[in-house]
Image: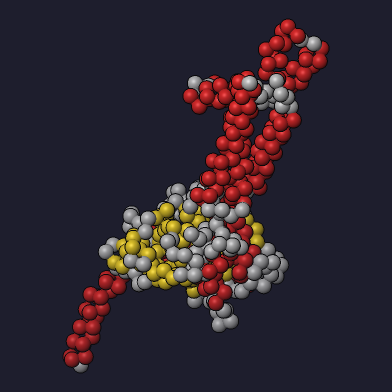
Amino acid sequence: MRRSTALYLALAGAISILAPAAQGGVSIKGIDTGGYPDVRVSVVTSQHSSSAPTLTENGLRVSLVSAENLGRAKSVVLALDRSRSMRGKALADALAAARAFVRAKAPSDRIAIVGFGSRAVQLTRFSSTTTDAVGALRTMAVDSQEGTALYDAVVASARALAVEPLPGRVIIVLTDGRDVSSQASLEAAIAESKNSGASVYAIAIESPQFSPEPLRKLAKETSGAYHGAASSAALGREYSAIAGELRRTWRLEYATTARPGEDATLRAVANGSSSQPATISLPSSLGPGAADPKPSRLLPDVFYRTVLGTQVMALVSFFIVLLAATLAMTTVKGARLRKRLAPHLITTSDIRKRKQEKERFAAAAGLFRATEGALEHWKFWQRLERLLERSDLPLRTVELVYLIAGAALLGATFGTLSGQSALVTFAMRLGSGFLPIGVVWFHASRRLEAFGH
């Protein structure tokens, strides 16, 4: 008896010594290569740290494009199952645990609530205050219709997160059953979450009939985590575990040097500990001619994902093309010379043309005046002005400047839409911007040659 007791104590002591070492590790939880050449890596450390882990690729330390700790300011969607199977104690426990999570959040975290039964509904907007979220969680009731639209809820949550300003984005979805009424599939829910940069943390009230595999896949593919609860009474503990894990989770992004079709080995180092190596295999389809490469962007991704951003881009492009076409159609050789002689040779037709010209630019007069006031002292502006005088084209310097800007924007847009690299897109932007200057220089050269003869 004494010998077994001594053995037990020795074993307990060994465990107590080894436990801190085990807890001192760091692990790579998820890797996303969908934004190639940018690779997004989720790293979990054993304890919270104010500095980001370092990352190596094939033994060489990489330069991080971004490093976000999910315990800091983030946007979180709490998606809760309110289907008929949740009625009674299960829903009451779920709502109480969610309210506790909301009250304990970081002050800068923004939270929105989504409820799903027969369909998914966003109940509140994102807010850093807890009033709306707690109010929605107090009044949420069981759906009167049958159905569990789990995947629709994830898709709706991801789309809402896509336009959030905070880089940290998390979906915490709680359910007690499988999806039976969604229009979206599991693959669509995973794709939407990846596109919005959201990690899905799934909490399931497990029963003998419950199959966790879909939720495990959803969490793994989005660099989240799956948490199973034996009963609704344990939900508070699972929410707390997720909050603690978020504080220890870093989302790192870097530009890989690996080419499509190659493998790369990643390691993360934090608090003096190194993770196990993680191998990524880049599909050959990510190379030239890929169906969905990540294009270079003139503006942040959020601008392209919103309806307003698309409309603004279309409107700007329309006015640029309209301005260019108007100026091209109204270009008349020798117009500048006739303007100088106008006080001596003015006719009724000339008066009418001058009036039409003034009306043509009346809407843009304020913008043109402001631009002239801001740029007219620049040497580049003065050189453009002299070049226009030599060309005798009926253009003001401010009009040429906007033509240059519009041409550069159209060139860059074409490069972006055709999937060119950032360097090629920049070259197209630069070349397109100099195109109007080239046209004016050509007219000036021809006019100087005519005077020489």
Evaluate whether residue 89 shows in this view. no
Seen in the picture, residue 332 relative to 435 is either above or below; the reply is: above
Q: Quadrant of residue 367?
A: top right
At a point 59% along the width and 49% down the height, the residue shown is 415
In the rendered image, residue 437, in percent from the top left (x then y), is placed at 58, 32
Residue that sits furthest to the right in the current view: 348
Q: Quadrant of residue 450?
A: top right
At a point 52% along the width and 69% down the height, the residue shown is 283
Q: Quadrant of residue 149?
A: bottom right
In the rendered image, residue 292, in percent from the top left (x then y), is placed at 59, 61
Seen in the picture, residue 153 relative to 336 is either above or below; the reply is: below
In the image: residue 357, left or right of residue 376: right
At a point 78% along the width and 15% down the height, the residue shown is 350
Which part of the image, by quadrant, shows the C terminus? top right
Seen in the picture, residue 90 relative to 127 is either above or below; the reply is: below
In the image: residue 370, left or right of residue 274: right
Evaluate whether residue 222 shows in this view. yes
In the rendered image, residue 154, in percent from the top left (x then y), is placed at 59, 63
Which of the two residues, 109 or 281, is positioned nearer the viewer here? 281
In the rendered image, residue 310, in percent from the top left (x then y), is placed at 65, 46
Which of the two residues, 29 or 335, is positioned nearer the viewer here? 335
At a point 66% along the width and 24% down the height, the residue shown is 393
